Image (tube, rainbow, N blue to C red):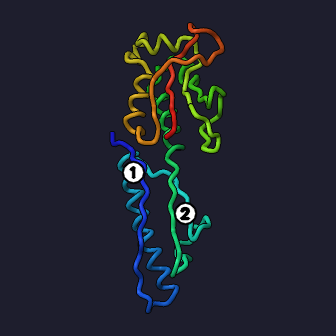
């Protein structure tokens, strides 16, 4: 599994001033399209798919790359990889969960600074994100007391996620109290702290 690396790439494009403004804009847009294709290929190699991106032309959200100012224009492609990271951790938890009734698969929750949330929102500003199961027998599964998950679930998924997304966030296995009880109510958890 390839490790995801956070990066920014800036290109300066030299265009022929003898060309018309529209032709210069097309030249710049063509270079931007090639750079986008390279970034998408790199993401596909690492993630196995192409994450969504937003395109900005001269500071405004736009897919019309040919509308770039031919003299001082800027084209930016922004990939939101944190959303992908959280979705992938959730997907891996379900994938690695033992299945008898489906209750355990459906029990995985995400908490932002201790408050349950429907999903990751980059505007939330939480310092700590925690995935945890709400079923009381989650600790038994984590200790390998399930034939379908002899190595547990949360610790294995935390290791996979840390290997792939370690450059975007600190990801570790822990135990957390998410049910409102004492130490004996602590559940296996994946703790994510964004960088």
User: Could you say whether the residue bearing mark 1 is in a helix, strand or loop?
Assistant: helix
Q: Residue at x 50, y 12 (%)?
A: 139
Could you say where residue 173 lies in the image, as x and y percent from the top left? 45, 23
Q: Residue at x 42, y 82 (%)?
A: 15
Could you say where residue 68 lies in the image, as x and y percent from the top left? 54, 76
Between 104 and 24, the residue placed more toward the observer is: 24
In the picture of the structure, the residue carrying the numbered disc 1 is 44
How packed mark 1 is, by other alpha carbons closer than 10 Å (few <14, some 14-19, many 20 or more), is: few
Q: Residue at x 56, y 77 (%)?
A: 67
Q: Determine whether 94 is above or below 28 in the image.
A: above
Q: Residue at x 47, y 74 (%)?
A: 29
Between 138 and 192, the residue placed more toward the observer is: 192
> Between marks 2 and 1, how big is the CA–CA gap?
18 Å
User: Could you say whether the residue bearing mark 2 is in a helix, strand or loop?
Assistant: strand
Q: Determine whether 110 is above or below 143 in the image.
A: below
How packed mark 2 is, by other alpha carbons closer than 10 Å (few <14, some 14-19, many 20 or more), is: some
* Of labels 2 and 1, the one closer to you: 2
- Label number found at residue 55: 2
Q: Residue furthest bottom?
A: 18
Quarter of the image for residue 114 reads: top right
């Amino acid at each position: 599994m390839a490790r995801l690396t956070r990066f920014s790439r800036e290109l300066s494009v030299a265009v022929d001033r003898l060309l018309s403004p529209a032709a210069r804009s097309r030249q710049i847009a063509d270079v931007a399209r090639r750079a986008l294709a390279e970034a998408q290929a790199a993401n596909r190699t690492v993630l196995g798919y192409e994450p969504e991106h937003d395109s900005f032309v001269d500071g405004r959200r736009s897919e019309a790359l040919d509308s770039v100012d031919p003299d001082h224009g800027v084209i930016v492609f922004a990939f939101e990889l944190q959303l992908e990271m959280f979705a992938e951790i959730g997907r891996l938890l379900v994938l690695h969960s033992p299945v008898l009734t489906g209750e355990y698969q459906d029990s995985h929750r995400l908490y932002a600074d201790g408050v349950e949330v429907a999903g990751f929102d980059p505007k939330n500003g939480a310092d700590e994100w925690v995935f945890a199961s709400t079923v009381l027998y989650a600790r038994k599964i984590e200790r390998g007391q399930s034939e379908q998950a002899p190595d547990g679930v949360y610790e294995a998924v935390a290791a996979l996620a840390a290997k792939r997304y370690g450059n975007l966030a600190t990801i570790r296995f822990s135990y957390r109290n998410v049910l409102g009880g004492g130490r004996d109510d602590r559940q296996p958890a994946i703790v994510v702290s964004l960088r």
